[in-house]
Image: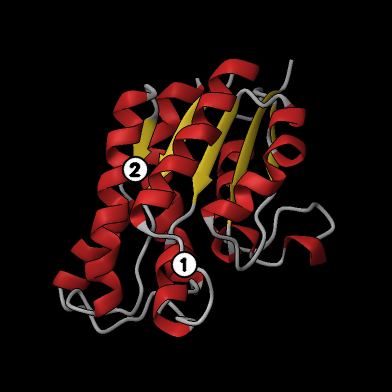
Amino acid sequence: MAKKILLIGDSITDCGRREDQEGLGYGYVRILHDYLVTTYPYADYQIVNTGIGGDRVTDLAARWQTDVIDHQPDYVSISIGINDVWRQLDRPEIEQVTSETFHQVYVKLLTQVKEETNAQIVLMEPTIIEEDTESTGNKMLKDYVEIITNLAQQFDATIVPTHQAFIKYLQAENNYKLTTDGVHMNSAGNMLMATTWLRACEERLK
């Protein structure tokens, strides 16, 4: 029986999935799919991408039933938080998702997964806002990363330290860029996300 791995998030997860015949997109989800298919040819992994560009955790909540619970996945991987912070910087006029709201909504989503599915939960840290460790966005993200780390402990989830991986890369002062605009990944950024995910999760998939 196929193991269904569902990945949900914002544009970094979405990454053109609706223009892709397989519905996977061209980002880290595609890399994960291709790695698992070629590394474990006798396994039967079904990869489902339900990312939507621009989403915050409140947007995930609005579509959680249809885009997660109804799929009854074996694994659900969540990548959210960038827009929750970024919108505070570029759209201050709209209603904001504070760290308190982020935590409250996230708890409800994970509780629903625990109560209504048998899925193992994977929580990805939000990546970066600007390729600068001292940027305002990256400083603001720290609270959201801490929330996700605590939720992983609370819900017995696997944590994927993607924020840490990107910060470590930036601290090396390599001039090769990982994003196209400070947020959205280029191929190298997608590779870093995928390899970090695999290091954290691969053993649990076997």
> Is residue 119 visible to us here?
yes
Q: Residue at x 65, y 60 (%)?
A: 14
Residue position for label 2? 148
Return the x and y of residue 130 as percentages of the image width and height: 33, 79
In the drawing, does residue 175 fall left or right of residue 178?
A: left
- The residue closer to the viewer here, 100 or 151, is 100
- At label 1, the amino acid type is Gln
SS of the residue under disc 1? loop
Q: Is residue 80 above or below residue 187?
A: above
Q: Give the label, 2 or 1, closer to the camera.
A: 1
Return the x and y of residue 88 as percentages of the image width and height: 41, 75
- Within the image, what quadrant is residue 15 found in? bottom right
Identify the mark at residue 20; answer none if there is no mark: none
Residue position for label 1? 96
Picture mark count: 2
SS of the residue under disc 2? helix
Of labels 2 and 1, earlier in sequence is 1
Q: Residues within 10 Å of mark 1 (few under 14, many from 20)?
A: some
Q: Is residue 27 above or below residue 37?
A: below
Q: Residues within 10 Å of mark 2 (few under 14, many from 20)?
A: many
Quarter of the image containing the N terminus?
top right
